[in-house]
Image: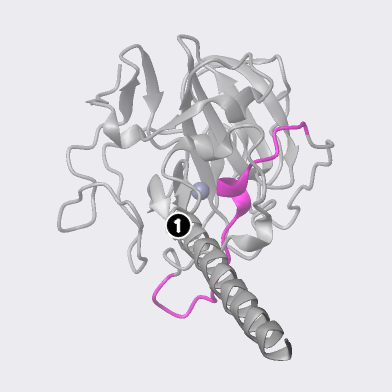
């Protein structure tokens, strides 16, 4: 009888190991599959209801200058899953000089930043100037937007960066200047967020919007509901909510319907360099 019991126990035990082994393998494979599809390939990574990402999970190495500048960590602009309005808590970066408001100039050239690894960089000439560049693009076939709403070079393009979607263009310069409205429109958002810092969102009509993030502060008269023209100063380029990354502008072109619960985070980011260039209107 004892032998029978022992045999039964062994069989049950082996079956348990097998079941456990299968379950473990499935779980393991599930984990692998999940890791093989990290946050995604499209802007829908920011759709409301998707959670689980925190600022601390994001890291950035691909825009670290190759020279002696210190290592930087990713600003959380790609991790913006929080669609609830954050508390308004402006964090002016008082250390930065505030440039004159009337300095907006459209130049005929724009380049990617030298001595940096620029992810998702547009096609460039040998001197790092962007090939075929003109100061405007025609967004969605209707709205003319300035490609470079500030001074500086492109330090990051739009697209997947370190397994995350970078939803706009980054501009940086050693001498941070003013950030300007890329086209006429109405200010829909002008407030501080934990992930974007001081940010402005402008409605240009025709379902086209732009976002300007990490501003050091807001220029006078910049408030939600206000009107802007092409070149209206929005605020100095800054570093708000971007941790240790150098001062830069994060600039997004967005399309879609703003009137959803997710507001600007329900819009679809577009790569400005995928629109046709247009000269000064
Ligand atoms: Zn950015």
Which residue position holds label 1? Answer: 33
Question: For residue 270, which quarter of the picture?
Answer: top left
Q: Where is residue 44? Give x, y as percent.
A: 51, 34
Q: Nearer the viewer, residue 247 or 11?
A: 11
Q: Is residue 127 above or below residue 188?
A: below
Question: For residue 278, which quarter of the picture?
Answer: top left
Q: Which residue is at a point 19% across and 58% down the rendered structure image?
A: 127
Q: Nearer the viewer, residue 228 or 161?
A: 161
Q: Residues within 10 Å of mark 1 (few under 14, many from 20)?
A: few
Q: Decide whether residue 84 is among the magenta residues.
A: yes
Q: Is residue 24 left or right of residue 84?
A: left
Count of labels shown?
1
Q: Which residue is at a point 53% across and 46% down the rendered structure image?
A: 249
Q: Where is residue 109? Give x, y as percent.
A: 27, 42
Q: Tell me, yes or no, if residue 181 can be seen here.
A: no
Which span is picked out in magenta? 65-85
């Amino acid at each position: 009888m004892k032998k029978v019991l022992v045999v039964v126990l062994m069989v049950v035990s082996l079956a348990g190991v097998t079941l456990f082994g299968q379950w473990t393998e499935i779980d393991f494979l599930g984990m692998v599959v999940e890791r093989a599809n990290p946050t995604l390939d499209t802007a829908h990574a920011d759709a409301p209801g998707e959670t689980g990402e925190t600022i601390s999970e994001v890291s950035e190495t691909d825009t670290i200058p190759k020279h002696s500048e210190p290592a930087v960590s990713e600003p959380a602009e790609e991790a913006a899953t929080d669609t609830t309005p954050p508390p308004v808590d402006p964090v002016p970066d008082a250390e930065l000089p505030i440039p004159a408001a009337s300095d907006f100039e459209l130049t005929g050239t724009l380049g990617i930043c030298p001595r940096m690894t620029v992810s998702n960089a547009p096609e460039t000439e040998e001197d790092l100037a962007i090939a075929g560049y003109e100061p405007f693009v025609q967004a969605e076939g209707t709205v003319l937007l300035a490609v470079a709403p500030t001074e500086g070079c492109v330090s990051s393009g739009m697209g997947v960066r370190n397994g995350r979607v970078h939803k706009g263009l980054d501009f940086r310069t050693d001498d941070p200047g003013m950030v300007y409205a890329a086209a006429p429109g109405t200010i829909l958002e002008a407030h501080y967020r934990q992930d974007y810092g001081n940010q402005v969102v402008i409605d240009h009509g025709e379902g086209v919007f732009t976002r300007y993030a990490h501003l050091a502060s807001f220029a006078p008269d910049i408030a939600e509901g206000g009107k802007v023209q092409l070149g209206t100063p929005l605020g100095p380029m800054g570093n708000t909510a971007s941790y240790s990354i150098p001062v830069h502008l994060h600039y997004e072109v967005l399309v879609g319907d703003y009137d959803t619960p997710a507001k600007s985070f329900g819009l679809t980011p577009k790569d400005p360099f995928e629109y046709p260039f247009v000269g000064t209107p």
